[in-house]
Structure formats: structure tokens, C-alpha cells
Amino acid sequence: MPVNTGVLHRAGAPSPSRDLDPESARPSGPVGLDAVRARLTGRVPTRLRPHLPDLLAYGTYLLLAIWACGRLWSHPRGRISGHLPIDNVEFFWWLSHAARSLVHFDNPFFSTQMNAPDGVNIMANTSVLGIGIPLAPVTLLFGPQVSYDVYLTLALAGSAATCYYVLSRHLVRSRLAAFLGGAFFGFAPGVVHHANGQPNFVSNFLLPLIVLRVVKLREPGRWLRNGMILALLVCWQLFLNEELLTLTALGCLAVIACYAAMRPADARRAVRPFVLGGAVAVGVATPLLAYPIWFQFTGPQSYAGIPELFNNWGEDITAFFTFARDTLAGSSPVEQTIGRTEQNSWFGAPLVILTVIMVVLMWRCSLPARVVTVVGTGFAVLALGPHLRLDGRERPSVPLPWLVFEHAPLVRYMYPSRLIFVVIACLAVLLALACDRVPRLELPGSPVRFRYLWALAVAVALIPIIPRPMPGVSPPHVPAFISAGGWKDYVDDRHSLVTVPLPSNTLGLKAVMWSAVTGQEFKIPRGYFLGPDRDQGGVGRFGATRSKTDDLLVKVSNTGRFADVTAADRENALAELRYWRAAIVVLDPTDRRAEQLRKAVTDLTGITPRYVTDVWVWDVRTLVDGAGR
């Protein structure tokens, strides 16, 4: 999420290029990828020569994304994330929903195929409709697993590519510098960490373009065009990740405030076109987003916020100096030293040291460097959370600035740790600026020797955080009874298919998987989603409101033990089966403690199961509506 360095363009600057850093306008010879282009021009068709650096950058990003997702691509239908399999399968379901909503002309903002009969408010979840709908043809042709791999790969490469585009066209002269900044933005350790099952936090390809459009709002005479483009980009991003859109807005506000404080005269001259363009953006975006946002907060299965469980998840200072698990220098055991938190700030000591050096070298010669340094430092401090954490231990006696903001409307339900995404953007900009300017600084000593030392320092900082292939594991087993359509003999559009154990955010991963890979052809009760907790006044929770039958089956699944089923247990089970409009209950015999679960369901329903194809099936239609065979 690149921070808005665009407001740094001096009002009235004659050239639209490099307008974010006017001090970098000194002519220079070919550097970085430009030098490579100069050597290869004789071997490249004339038409492609001007675009060779860009093609090299974009191709490298794509190869790096394929490398990071390599274990998933090795068997697209047979591998899922090894770190967050439940989240991975959840996104299979969201992609499947987007495709289904197009084919069946369903409301894309709501579905009763999960959590039947109550349904799920799609807008109130991380449904990524903004990518699920464009990828619907891939999902329908090849399944949500392949669609997910395409999505994740293009999101990683695309985020780096758009950042490179903005940096190379509007901030730095060196394509190599822009390439390094884009690579860090797209493949930072925190981004790759979320690629393990949470692609919505990897879908950052629109954010550099949004920031660029915010920058261009200050252009006289173009406020109408720039405002309209900004509105459309914001609308698209809302359907990818609202949290990152909010962070982008907060980062932009911080940069604008810093720039106005450092260049008040220039800021005053930009007020009129900026306000006019902003008004156009709001005027265009509001009617487009009014219904989706209304549906999210007031539609069926909406909820009144989520419990403030994670607003104290701040960064550990030690994490900044630690290599992340999924980098070349990282390892899994390191997670046990400072806790299994999101690894957003795990940059490694060499990069932290290089950052300090870049700030020292660039502070006086680059206004953009000063601004992103101030903003990045501020967000890094806020990301530490309400109290100091050091080496895996919280120091409640040391309060931090997050305490001032933790109950603010926009951020009260955010993880403080995720503010590091703004820091990542600031580092990407600072890295590009430094790699563009530092080799050309007039410093004492040999210029050639200094450039070699600088290249070595950058390599030492960045090579260890190159991503490794993310781990993959086998997905939940899909029995032939599901994949071959045996369930169709029992379940129609009015009834649901109940799995044992019931799906939730901790158990029942198979049910969500079965629903996704069959194109959501049957309804399932409960599931993995965010919805209202009826027992807590409509406050959001993961999964459906607690169920007595679910609690009993969860206990059996976890321990293999349960007390004798009582008449009250049977009455509860019957009431819930009727509420879910269940047609059959299905148990995969390969499940853990399948025998104990089979006995429990048999005792609860009073029905002896049949072994159909490769699963145990309880036909409960007789109990539910008397339609059984």
C-alpha cells in the first residue's frame, strides 16, 4: 500500500514526470536496468526497445510470484496453504460464490448456501468480489482451487508491478531503483505472510494507482477527470479489501499533513483543485457504493461490529529485527520465540540498519524521503499497540500512543499490527529514492568504490528476505459421494446437507471445501464466516451462534468421549435439524474419531446410517418433514 508521496509535487512544476521528487531531475547516464537496456538494444526489435526495462521488471515479478506459490501450482487441486488451510478453503468458497452469483443471477451481496437457512452477508465478510467476479470464467472452467492460485499469483506480481509503474514514472529516474521498490512492496515479508491463505491482504495492486490519483488531484484544470478516476479505483478496492483501503486513506492523510507542514505555500496553492477533485470523487463514489455499504451494515446477517479481541495485537519490537518464516533467512522455530502473531514487521536486522542509513543519507536532499520517514516512523510506533512488547513479553507498565486511537471509529476493530502495511509502503518509496539518488551523491572518496559498497549493503538487506515457496498440504478429502453427485438423490434446493462435525472456524473444514468444489450446489448449515451472535445482541462473531448439538459433536470430535445422549439432547438435535431443513447428515469415515461421531449421531437421531459410496449417510427427511424414503 504505497503512501501518498504524490502531494510532494511542487505546484506549477513544468514536467509531469518525476513530479514526486523534483530534486531528482538532474540528468544522469544510464543506471541499473537502463544500462542493461543499452547493452541489449542491438538484439531487441526497435518497437520493444523503449519497453525492455518494464518487460524485464514485470516478467521478474511474475516469476517471483510463481516461485512463491510454487507448491500450490505443483498440484493446483491437490495442495492448499500449509499455514492457514481454513482461510485458504474459505477463499475457495468466496470465489465459488462470485461465480455462482453470475450464473444464477443471485444477489452477490448475500447467500444462503452457507449458514442455511439464515445465510451470510457477503459484504460483511472478506468476499473479494472485486477479483472473484473477473475470475468467474476461470472458476467455472477449472474450479475454485485453480482460480485461487491464479488470483494469488497475479495479486503478488500485480502489486509489485503497479508500484514499479508509479515509482518509475513519477518518482525516480532509475528503473532499477523503481524495480527494487516495487519488489519490496509486492513481496515484503508481511505481504508474503498473508499470502498463506489470506489473499485479500495481497491484493494491493490498486493502491499505488489510488495514491497516484490522490496526488494528481492537485493538478489545475484536471480535477474532474482525476476525481472520477479516483472514485472508480476506490469503488473497485472496496470489493477487494476495505481494511487496506482504510489504511491507504489514513496514510494519505498523514502524508498530506506532513507535506503541508513542510511546504505550506505549495500546499495552499493546491487546495482549490484538490478540494474540487475530491468532491468529484466523493460525488461519483457515493451513489455507486451506497447500496453495498448499506447492505453491509444494515442488511440481513449484518452485525454491530466485532468483539475487540485483536485491537491489542501490537508488534513486538524484536520482530523488526527478525527474519520472517517464509523468507530465505527465516525459519519456523523462530515463531515460538516471540509468539505466533502476524509477521507483518519481520524485516530482519540488515534492512532495519539499511533504513537508518537511507534516512541519514536522504534526509537533506529529498523532501519525499523526509515525508515518508516521518509517516513511516509514526505508523511503526502506532503498530506497536497499546503496550510495549519486547522479546515475546508484554510490558503493561509502558503505555504507547495506540491507546489514544484504539477506540476511534475507523480503527477500533483493526489489528494495530496491520498498520505496518503503511510502513511497508514508506520503506518501498524510501528504498526506491535511495537507490536512485545515493549512487549519484557527491561524497568524499572514490565514487566507484562507494557505489559498490552501496550495492553490497542493499543486497545484504534484501536477499535474506526474498520469499521462499510457501508450504502446502493436502486439501480436505472430497468423497466420491460428493464429487460424483450421489447427494443429489437426497438433497433438493429447499433442504440442506449437514456434515459431521458441523463447519466452523475451527472444525468442519471439509463441509466448506465440499460446498466450494461443487459450485455450492447444496446448502450447508453453519460455516466459516463473520455474522451476528444472537446470544450477544448481534455483535459479530466467527461462525454461527453456538448450538447445543454442535457443542456436543465438537466435544466428541476433540476428545472422543461423550456422556449418554439424553432426551433433551435428542430434542435439541431434532429442533436444529428442522431449523436447518436438513435432508441428510453425512460423515466421512476418514475423519478423526469417525466411529465415535457415528455412534453419537445415531443416538441423537435414532436412525441407523447407510454406507453410500464412501460415506455414512443418515436420511433425516422423515424427522424433518416426513419426506423420507
Image (cartoon, helix red, strand yellow):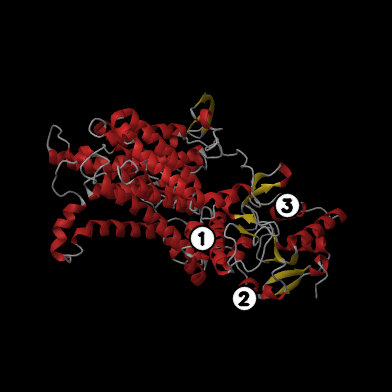
Residue 422 screen position, x and y as percent: 41, 40
The CA distance from mark 2 to mark 3 is 31 Å
Depth check, mark 1 against mark 2: the one in front is 2
Specify the label residue 555 is tagged with: 3
Vertical order, 402 against 627 (above or below) = above
Vertical order, 317 against 298 (above or below) = above
Count neighbours of disc 2 (C-alpha within 10 A) and say few if under 14, some if 14 to 19, many if 20 or more. few
Specify the label residue 327 is tagged with: none
Report the residue marked by disc 2: 484
The CA distance from mark 1 to mark 2 is 22 Å
Count neighbours of disc 3 (C-alpha within 10 A) and say few if under 14, some if 14 to 19, many if 20 or more. some
Q: Which of 3 and 602 is in front in this view?
A: 3
Label 2: element kind: loop
Residue at the spot x=42%, y=46% of the render? 281
> In which quarter of the view is residue 3 placed?
top left
Label 1: element kind: strand
Residue 347 visible to the viewer: no
Q: Earlier in the sequence, mark 1 or mark 3?
A: 1
Residue at the spot x=60%, y=66% of the render? 477
Report the residue marked by disc 1: 80
> In which quarter of the view is residue 57 placed?
bottom left
Identify residue type, mark 1. Answer: Ile
Residue 586 visible to the viewer: yes
Residue 416 screen position, x and y as percent: 50, 37
